[in-house]
Amino acid sequence: MVGAVLSGGRNTRFPYEKGFVKIEGTTIIERNLELLRSVTEEVVISANEPERYFRLGVPIIGDVVEPGGPMAGIYSVLKCTGAGAAMFVACDMPFINRELVMYIAEKTAGDATVPVYGGRPEPLLAVYSRGALGAMEEMLSGGERAMTGLLERIDVRYIDEDAVRKIDPEGKSFININTVEDLKKVLEENK
């Protein structure tokens, strides 16, 4: 299984690339690459501005379709790597629990394996397989980019929230940083 950090977002609400925010002395993207290295055979970065990531020394895959948010990144990684399945994590999630990632990978089935937290699916910490490519291609060519729409069209194995909470009771894996205010809050809460 390939591990991929999704880092191709527009970054409109943050003054610089969110993946390069340092938490406890290490950038989020470096933390997530290291995490994925520990549970997958290969790691890549999904990004449309590869020059930002060259120094990290891992393959970078740009969108092979009109840029369309996380779905275009997921589609491109699956197409370009030829992997049967890939574990995806967002570049702005600093506290992903390794045990949870391993659990999701072990439970992989269908077109996607997606954890549920707070009553909602969390599609950017999930496994997607090549079986989802047809639905993604159809949606992207029609201008649809919503991950929730994709989950409605494919065979998804949801990881029950009770199982997720046994591993990550506070849901720290699903904390993401979208704004400077989010970052300040995360740093304050995790001192």
Image (cartoon, rainbow, N blue to C red):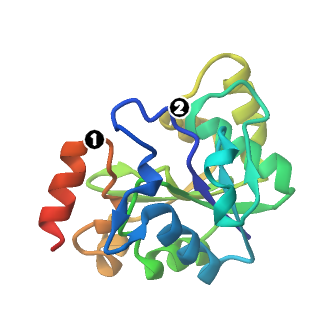
- Residue 14 x/y as whole percent: 34, 38
User: Is 101 placed left or right of 160 in the picture?
Assistant: right
Quadrant assignment for the C terminus: bottom left
> In which quarter of the view is residue 88 placed?
bottom right
Q: Is residue 109 visible?
A: no
- On residue 149, the disc is 2
- On residue 61, the disc is none
Q: Residue sitting at 29 percent across and 73 percent down?
A: 165
User: Is 184 placed left or right of 69 in the picture?
Assistant: left
Name the amino acid type tagged 2: Gly
User: Is 107 placed left or right of 64 in the picture?
Assistant: left
* 109 versus 36 height, above or below: above
* 169 versus 9 height, above or below: below
Pick the front one: 35 or 149: 35
Quadrant assignment for the N terminus: bottom right
Q: Does dot 1 land on a helix, a strand or a loop?
A: loop
- On residue 179, the disc is 1
- Residue 91 x/y as whole percent: 49, 54
Name the amino acid type tagged 1: Thr
Q: Residue sitting at 34 percent across and 53 percent down?
A: 176
Pick the front one: 109 or 1: 1
Q: Are marks 2 and 1 in contact (CB under 8 Å)?
A: no
Q: CA distance from mark 2 to mark 1?
A: 25 Å
